[in-house]
Image: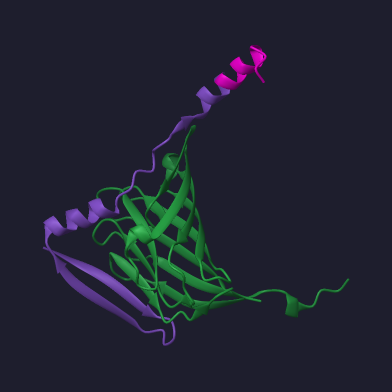
Chain colours: A purple, B green
Amino acid sequence: MVDVKHIIYDASSGSVEVKVEKVSDKDIEERRKALEVDETKSSVDLADLKRLVELAKKKGWI
Amino acid sequence: MAISLQTLPNMVRIASIKTDTDSTSVTISNINASRDDVLLLTFNTTNPADSKTIYHLYFNGDSTDTNYYTQYMLGNGSTLSSDRENASVVGAATASQTLACTVYIYVSPSGIIKFLSLVNRDDSSSVKVLTRTGVYTQTVTGISSITITGSNANSIGSGTVIELWKLRR
């Protein structure tokens, strides 16, 4: 079990509350998977792109 | 030509938080922003988790990621990557590394929340540049709360500084 903390700041009064929720390791892992995203999709290597542009210029395509 | 100071925007600080414990989420409530308003959020944190953490941004208590879309561009060395996701993400940080994030939040006259996140993530020779634009698909009359949530448990490190400003016309 993990104590998961949620800090709540009230902008009108400036008060702070910390809510603590006990969460099982399994639920923690499920939450992590649900919130995980992959930031490496559709990657383009700039060096490869430069080589392609040079090739296209040499061939007279651009 | 003289410019009246009355025509320049004034920034009003709505919230200033420095956390003293690792947490999973931080919510700023009672924001009271309406249509046409522009907010500026700064989020400066260290990821204390032992794996990469993705940080999400939610409005008005709606943490259903499918109600948001974000488009990102990430520069990592000579590699650029980009994609659109059906999730509300503002940034990420590798395990034990830092994230400095500035988010402009706009509420359109028609009630659409849009945001632009400018991120400096990770440290030393791993530093990366990340930009994200996002949109909340639900129509709103304003913003009452903003929540930042990390994908790992208690991944918003102790000592995190969050500030929220409103730009007034």
Q: In which quarter of the image is the C terminus of chain B?
A: bottom right
Question: Which residue is located at x 40 percent, y 59 percent?
Answer: B68
Residues in magenta? A52-62
Give the x, y percent position of residue B51.
26, 48
> Is B157 inside the magenta-drawn segment?
no
Q: Which residue lies furthest to the top in this view?
A: A59
Question: Which residue is located at x 53 percent, y 73 percent?
Answer: B165
Give the x, y percent position of residue B155.
29, 59
Q: Quick check: can you spot residue A34?
A: yes
Q: In which quarter of the image is the N terminus of chain B?
A: bottom right
Q: Dominant secondary structure of the magenta stretch?
A: helix
Give the x, y percent position of residue B91.
41, 53
Q: Quadrant of residue A4?
A: bottom left
Placement of B8 over or under B70, stated as above or below: below
Question: Which residue is located at x 42 percent, y 40 percent?
Answer: B126
* Nearest to the observer: residue B91 or residue B46: B91
